Image (cartoon, rainbow, N blue to C red):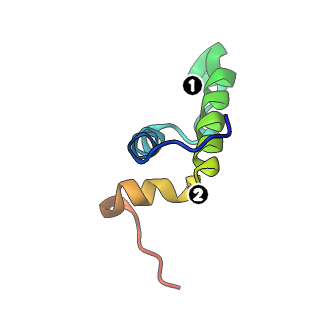
Amino acid sequence: MSEKINDAALKALKIAFSYMPKAIEVTKYEYGDRYQKVLEHIETVKETLLINDVDPEEVYGEINPENTPHSTY
């Protein structure tokens, strides 16, 4: 997939991504035999965000600004 998505779909994807586990949290111990599939899903969402000019690292702060520490630099 290399096409940009509409604004409503992008916002929905950002919200869903903010609830996804971080890749470092996905282990075979926690997710069993499906851990590799979960990692693939996370990567697919990240790629779609990047195609749409969204930094995955900034999504949580955009969706949940009240729960995000403010940096001062």
Q: Earlier in the sequence, mark 2 or mark 1?
A: 1
| Residue 24 image point, x, y percent | 64, 41
| Position of residue 15 measured from the top left corner of the image (x, y, whole percent) | 40, 43
Q: Secondary structure at mark 1?
A: helix
48 or 64, nearer to the observer: 48
Query: Would residue 19 be found to the left or right of residue 25 on screen?
Result: left
| Quarter residue 32 falls in | top right
Work out whether 52 lies above or below 73.
above
Pointer 1: what residue?
30
Residue closest to the far top: 33
Which image quadrant for residue 27?
top right
Mark 2 residue type: Asp
At label 1, which amino acid type do we have? Glu
Q: Nearer the viewer, residue 12 or 36?
A: 12
Instruction: Provide residue 68's location: percent of width, then percent of height.
Output: 39, 63
1 left or right of 58?
Answer: right
Q: Which residue is mark 2?
A: 55
Q: Nearer the viewer, mark 2 or mark 1?
A: 2
The single residue placed furthest to the bottom in the displayed view is 73
Q: Nearer the viewer, residue 70 or 5?
A: 5
- Number of numbered discs: 2
State the residue in front, 3 or 18.
3
Q: Position of residue 38 (x, y in %)?
A: 61, 26
Location of the N terminus (image quadrant) = top right
Q: Label 2 to label 1, Cα distance in Å?
A: 27 Å
